[in-house]
Amino acid sequence: MTTSSIRRGVIIVLSSLLLLLLPSASSSFRVDVIRRPTPTPSSATPAFREAPAFRNGDDCPESLRVDVAMTLDANYLRGTMAAVLSMLQHTSCPESVTFHFLAARPELDVLAAIRAAFPYLDFRVYRFDSARVRGRISRSIRNALDQPLNYARIYLAHILPADVRRVIYLDSDVIVVDDIRRLWQVDLEGRVVAAPEYCHANFTKYFTDAFWADQELAGTFRGRHPCYFNTGVMVMDVELWRAGGYTKMVEQWMAVQKQRRIYQLGSLPPFLLVLAGKIKAVDHRWNQHGLGGDNLEGKCRSLHPGPISLLHWSGKGKPWLRLDSRKPCAVDYLWAPYDLYRSSSPALEG
């Protein structure tokens, strides 16, 4: 059996598996395939195919607006493009989704690539000043986790305009295979953040022995039932975050980290210190995380059992890099159909 035959077999098996796990597809949206030529951005940024133009179904209220925030960086642009396409493809109200991109610096070729790939996309771009966090960041176990833009989610409430009262924050290495409105409509029940919780995880491993040995530091979790949650998928009450001074609280723990070295992992632990045990838990289907493997080696991992609404390649291994290296993991074939990079499968081209 040839390598291509094996690969086709893997794709068929995984596609069948995913269809069994996914919720029933919505049939109320229209797809208009745009076939006119797309201008190519500068050679510094990969050229992407133009995505279909997705239109709202008849049942979409005019007042509906789903706000989604993501960071925007040339190194992760291919992942961002795929994530956007997946959300538009699987929601019945794609024209009601507004994207808010946070960028560390203006990269005109990146913006040109987005406009060319999604001519009808409703999106806004905001500059995130890296100086706000550069002096607060401590070295972690992986260089990618130390980039200032990775901390932009802490400042969402101070960057987004006043008319954004609730926002879904997503990492650039996700694929949404359900209607994003279902996550948007979650009842926060007065909590500032909603996200899938994982109470079976060993919570102690996210902090150093020195942290747990200090009664005052460890006492921050007293009276709480802290559980791990991944900050790459969050629903945030922007007004409540701002009013509650949560940015300042996270920054204070980052200052402690600079002095005491109480954790090893980037921007996640200070979120846990402030919010673990206080968030609104969301169904696990909304963050099938860890598909990028561990933070050091990025070894392949398989899907967790249960239904899936969002796949998340958290960890070192990113699907576009593994596919390009011709050493993909099995789960990477679930990401590939959303890849708009020109050299990939021409499935979406007219």
Image: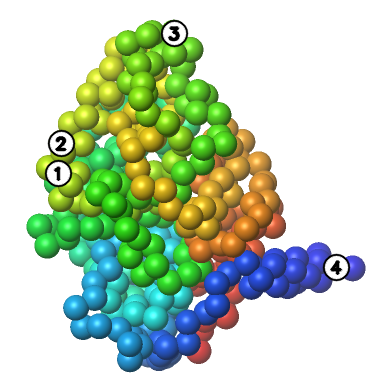
Helix, strand or loop under label 4: loop
Tell me which amino acid carries mark 4: Thr
- Of the numbered discs 3 and 2, the one sitting upstream in the chain is 3
Real-space Cα distance between discs 3 and 1?
32 Å
The residue closer to the viewer here, 101 or 157, is: 157
Decide if residue 309 is on the left or right side of residue 224.
right
Real-space Cα distance between discs 1 and 4?
57 Å
The residue closer to the viewer here, 186 or 64, is: 186
> Would you say residue 325 is visible in this rendering?
no
Q: State if disc 2 and disc 3 touch (CB < 8 Å).
A: no
Tell me which amino acid carries mark 3: Ala
Give the residue number, with chain letter if any, for mark 4.
2
Helix, strand or loop under label 1: helix
The residue closer to the viewer here, 206 or 79, is: 206
Q: State if disc 2 and disc 1 touch (CB < 8 Å).
A: yes
Give the residue number, with chain letter if any, for mark 3.
213
Give the residue number, with chain letter if any, for mark 1.
242
Decide if residue 21 is on the left or right side of residue 80.
right
* Mark nearer the viewer, 2 or 4: 2
Residue 107 percent location from the top left of the image = 26, 56
Decide if residue 318 is on the left or right side of residue 234.
right
Real-space Cα distance between discs 2 and 4?
59 Å
The residue closer to the viewer here, 314 or 328, is: 314
Q: Residue 272 carries which label?
A: none
